[in-house]
């Protein structure tokens, strides 16, 4: 059917999570279903291909008939199946697929997939939500034909049970959350930039990932042997024996290097002149706490709470959330656990709670905006947090604050949550630190006013950079503009740090910027008291802090503030700190 | 167009022309001698195809025109009109 070219091919992408893995590829297509193969059918064989398609339809119909016969006649369910039986022979599905096989000479699977994709597009544009969802019937019917054509049960992403390397066009956070993660050695995707969600998730799972490969899904087939080098951003398809040996060595070398820096990571991070910084970890799943402790984290600087809301038909209840938070808080005690309240956005939306399609979810109803609009959901989470606070050291962090009013409202609802717990006589703790994420430019400008209502700021650089420079960090066309060292960003950081000092509140950073070694001198100079990052970068960052002098870093900051471009600042870092920072921490910006 | 060959109707059932109701129309239209069409505004769908009817996105309150090409299909036209006007017995 297809020739088996086995020449070694190197595909270049963007490194999103370090490490090396070697294994078999597992292709996941855009819809999360196995990729459908496309091949040409000779003229003479087309009528056989059509027969094969008809046989698959007949088989699907027989299966449905059997189910209908078993169902009691009055069941609504049986009516739906009758409709599905009628759909199997529908002109637009059945007739059109046969036409495509006949006229384009492609295999039945591809012809069917083409027809269904076209129909799906038509349905997607409908405004009536009920009618729009009817495409589901068509897709289900097509799926049952496809199953019979391919001859196997459909494998979906949740059911992957081999140790594989996932190859996808793109993976949404919702899709990534469905993957049985301990089964996956690494991720590679066609789309995405360094700061895309795929990368963040891969880093938190400590598996290598390469993104922005553009052509991975067209070049690689399932079960191909591939090497993913997350350190350089290279993916090697059909590696030769020599290459395999070379990468096995690199893999061992990398793991040894990690082991060494991990050993010294439990000591505090104190600069040469005796200034101590708290180096904390960002987590998403309660299970990640153990990795964080292993890497020597001084606490949790950002506990993302969205995962508990994924893949379920309803919202998690207060008790369920409380149990999860309590587990984390108890394990970490007395170290702080900073719980960020629900930060749902369009991309991460709950499968069953999509109220509207937003054209621009990053600028839409998300995070605190969403919570203030749904006070019941918000209050359930706040009550769970306040109850967990009785078991250790908890801080609350409100995301995406963009106006003064929002922090006032959030605090008011927090008080209400505390009062309701008091009334019910449940154990809780209200006297905890409350902070806001500084990640929207308006919050930077209003920092002095917002400071009066909070105990700390936590700067979320990923979103702050994205919103300030007006770029979508997942869009590879503009991702080169995503520059943490942009002069505008550094000035904003300076402003927030100065306001915090003046108002005597704490200032932390929890974005990707905090976990990048060559940014550390700058962050020390700005007076960040706490940095939070993906757990596996903690040892590296602690090592860098121990080699720096805060006094020097402050005067270095004065030089940085004179720079006009990210490139100049980067050159300045290299010139000033090149000897201190290890070679391997440099990445071209 | 000859009034004998077309009829205007309004969709009255709550869910509009969804898969089940479209299947009922298609079931009738499939017995016709010549083509039967469902027209909504400028778009026209083959009444014997459930999928084609669905692509018209006829929600409740939509005004549609049913068109036949052969007089012999008038009983089918009447039956479809009755079906729609009675809300598909839902």
Image: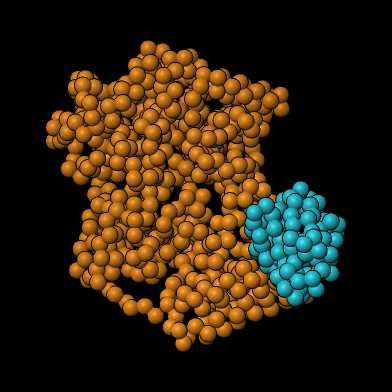
Chain colours: A orange, B cyan
Do we see residue A150 in this rendering? Answer: no
Where is residue A192? Give x, y as percent: 38, 49
Q: Is residue B3 left or right of residue A168?
A: right
Q: Please, is residue A280 above or below residue A587 in the view?
A: above
Q: Is residue A507 left or right of residue A331?
A: left
Asked which quadrant contains residue A53, the reply is bottom right
Residue beneath the point at 46% across and 77% down: A105
Where is residue A497? Give x, y as percent: 35, 20
Do we see residue A22 in this rendering? Answer: yes
Task: Single out the residue that lies furthest toward the top.
Answer: A502
Residue beneath the point at 64% across and 75% down: A60
Task: Single out the residue that lies furthest toward the bottom.
Answer: A44
**So how many labels did they put on this image?**
0
Camera-side residue: B77 or A357? B77
Residue beneath the point at 76% across and 71% down: B70
Where is residue B55? Give x, y as percent: 64, 58
Q: Please, is residue A268 above or below residue A494 in the view?
A: below
Asked which quadrant contains residue B20, the reply is bottom right
Residue beneath the point at 41% across and 65% down: A26
Where is residue A475? Give x, y as percent: 38, 45
- Quadrant position of the N terminus of chain A in the picture: bottom left
Q: Is residue A67 left or right of residue A107?
A: right
Camera-side residue: A465 or A434? A465
């Amino acid at each position: 059917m297809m020739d088996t070219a086995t020449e070694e091919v190197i595909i270049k992408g963007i490194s999103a999570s370090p490490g090396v893995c070697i294994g078999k590829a597992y292709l996941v297509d855009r819809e999360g279903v196995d990729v459908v193969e496309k091949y040409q059918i000779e003229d003479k064989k087309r009528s056989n291909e059509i027969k094969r398609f008809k046989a698959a339809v007949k088989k699907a119909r027989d299966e449905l008939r059997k189910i209908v016969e078993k169902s009691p006649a009055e069941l609504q369910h049986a009516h739906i199946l009758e409709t599905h039986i009628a759909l199997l022979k529908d002109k637009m599905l059945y007739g059109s697929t046969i036409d495509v096989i006949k006229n384009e000479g492609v295999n039945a699977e591809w012809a069917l997939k083409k027809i269904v994709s076209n129909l799906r597009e038509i349905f997607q544009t409908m405004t009536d939500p009920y009618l729009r969802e009817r495409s589901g019937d068509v897709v289900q019917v097509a799926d049952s034909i496809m199953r019979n054509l391919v001859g196997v049960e459909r494998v979906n992403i949740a059911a992957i049970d081999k140790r594989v390397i996932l190859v996808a066009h793109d993976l949404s956070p919702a899709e990534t959350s469905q993957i049985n993660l301990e089964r996956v050695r690494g991720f590679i995707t066609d789309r995405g930039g360094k700061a895309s969600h795929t990368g963040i998730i891969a880093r938190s799972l400590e598996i290598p990932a390469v993104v922005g490969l553009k052509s991975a899904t067209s070049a690689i087939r399932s079960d191909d042997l591939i090497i993913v080098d997350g350190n350089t951003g290279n993916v090697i398809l059909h590696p030769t024996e020599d290459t395999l040996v070379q990468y096995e060595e690199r893999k061992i070398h990398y793991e040894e290097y990690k082991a060494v820096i991990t050993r010294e990571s439990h000591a505090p991070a104190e600069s040469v002149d005796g200034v101590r910084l708290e180096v904390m970890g960002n987590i998403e799943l309660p299970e990640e706490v153990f990795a964080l402790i292993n890497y020597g984290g001084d606490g949790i600087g950002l506990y993302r709470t969205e995962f508990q809301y994924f893949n379920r038909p309803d919202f998690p209840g207060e008790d369920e959330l409380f149990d999860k938070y309590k587990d984390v808080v108890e394990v970490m005690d007395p170290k702080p656990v900073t719980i960020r309240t629900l930060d749902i956005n369009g991309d991460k939306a709950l499968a069953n709670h999509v109220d509207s399609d937003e054209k621009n979810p990053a600028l839409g109803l998300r995070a605190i905006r969403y919570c203030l609009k749904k006070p019941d959901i918000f209050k359930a989470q706040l009550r769970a947090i306040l109850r967990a606070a009785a078991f250790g050291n908890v801080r609350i962090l409100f995301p995406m604050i963009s106006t003064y009013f929002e922090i006032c409202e959030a605090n008011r609802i927090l008080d209400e949550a505390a009062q309701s717990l008091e009334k019910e006589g449940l154990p809780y703790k209200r006297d905890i630190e409350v902070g806001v994420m500084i990640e929207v430019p308006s919050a930077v400008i209003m920092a002095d006013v917002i400071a009066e209502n909070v105990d700390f700021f936590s700067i979320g650089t990923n979103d702050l950079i994205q919103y300030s420079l007006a770029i979508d960090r997942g869009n590879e066309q503009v991702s080169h503009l995503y520059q943490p060292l942009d002069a505008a960003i550094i000035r904003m950081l300076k402003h927030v740090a100065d306001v915090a000092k003046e108002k005597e509140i704490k200032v932390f950073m929890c974005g990707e910027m905090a976990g990048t070694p060559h940014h550390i001198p700058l962050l020390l100079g700005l007076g960040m008291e706490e940095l939070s990052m993906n757990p596996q970068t903690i040892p590296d960052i602690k090592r860098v802090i121990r080699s720096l002098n805060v006094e020097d870093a402050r005067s270095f900051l004065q030089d940085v503030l004179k720079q006009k471009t990210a490139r100049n600042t980067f050159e300045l870092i290299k010139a000033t700190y090149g000897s201190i920072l290890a070679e391997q921490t440099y990445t071209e910006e | 167009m000859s009034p004998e060959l077309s009829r205007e109707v309004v969709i009255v059932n709550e869910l509009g022309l969804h898969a089940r109701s479209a299947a009922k129309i298609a079931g009738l239209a499939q017995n016709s001698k010549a083509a039967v069409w469902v027209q909504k505004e400028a778009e026209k769908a083959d009444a014997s195809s459930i999928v084609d009817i669905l692509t018209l996105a006829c929600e409740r309150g939509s005004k549609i025109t049913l068109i036949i090409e052969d007089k012999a299909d008038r009983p089918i036209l009447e039956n479809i009109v009755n079906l729609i006007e009675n809300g598909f017995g839902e």
